[in-house]
Amino acid sequence: NLGYSEQILVRFDNEPPHAPVLSQIPLIVGITTLSVAGSAEANATVTVYVNDVSAGVVRAGVNGTFTVDVTLTTNGTNTITADARDTFGNGPGERSAYVYVMCDVTAPGAGTVVINSGGTYATGSVLHVGWSGYTDAHSGIQGYYYSFGTDTAEAKFTQGAEGELYTSNQGAVTAYVWAVDNAGNESNIGTDTIFMDTINPGVNITRIDGALPGAKIING
């Protein structure tokens, strides 16, 4: 008589998993926490590196997708990459290609504002406002807001270095200018003040020697 043992299927796997594929990551962010998503081998353990230092570990789902929050450690350019270890302990395999992220949490430096080329008085209702000296060392300046107040919603926006503001007010008027960088950080506000006088002077004719107003020759 012959007997047969139970058939056992054994899976042999000594190959490290392929490099994870990272989903699209913003090029510029204004915060230090970044959510990194991607895909890897199903159920693999994925390690995400920031500037070549382990910053987050997550297990991929049965469909291979993963998401993990990491901290950007440099105010400036950061590199993001990832590798994976499969459920059999193989790996880690090759790392994914580097992705570069600009982290900018620093506001632009404020500059100088000048109304009507530095004039003291204005006799017209349209003011020419210019500015210079605003700087940003990381993501770069996106543009400038300018207004008679400090409310962004009410301000005009331009990528240039000058603009025009209209006012019917009389007396001292202040223009406000602030820069915003590509990460959304806003600078301190620069100002300049000018005195508005757009009303022509009036002429009052008074009586002379009791006579009615009009032409009169005065001797002496």
Image (cartoon, helix red, strand yellow):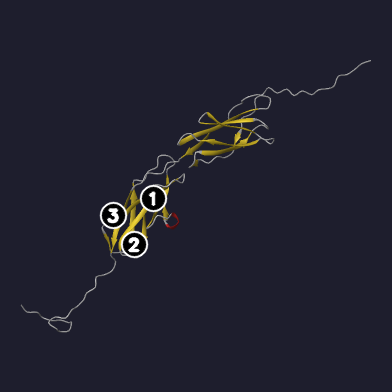
Q: Which mark is residue 126?
A: 2
Disc 3 is placed on an element classified as: helix
Disc 1: which residue? 178
* Residue sitting at x 29%, y 58%: 194
3 or 1: tag closer to the N-terminus: 3
At which x and y percent is residue 164?
Answer: 36, 58
Q: How many marks?
A: 3
Disc 3: which residue? 117
Would you identify the image quadrant in which residue 165 lies?
bottom left
2 or 1: tag closer to the N-terminus: 2
| Quarter of the image that includes the N terminus | top right
Q: CA gap, disc 2 to disc 1? A: 20 Å
At which x and y percent is residue 19?
Answer: 61, 30
Vertical arrangement, residue 219 with respect to residue 141, above or below = below
Would you identify the image quadrant in which residue 107 lies?
top left
Would residue 17 appear left or right of 195 to someone viewing this image? right
Residue type for callout 1: Trp
At label 3, counting other C-alpha atoms closer than 10 Å, the crowd grade (few under 14, some 14-19, many 20 or more) is few
Would you identify the image quadrant in which residue 90 lies?
top right
At label 2, counting other C-alpha atoms closer than 10 Å, the crowd grade (few under 14, some 14-19, many 20 or more) is few
Would residue 18 appear left or right of 153 to someone viewing this image? right
Q: As drawn, which residue projects farthest toward the bottom?
A: 211
Residue type for callout 2: Val
Q: Which mark is residue 196?
A: none
Would residue 176 appear left or right of 42 to someone viewing this image? left
Residue type for callout 3: Ser
* Residue sitting at x 51%, y 33%: 79
Disc 1 is placed on an element classified as: strand
Q: CA gap, disc 3 to disc 1? A: 18 Å
Disc 2 is placed on an element classified as: strand
Residue 97: tell me if it is visible: no
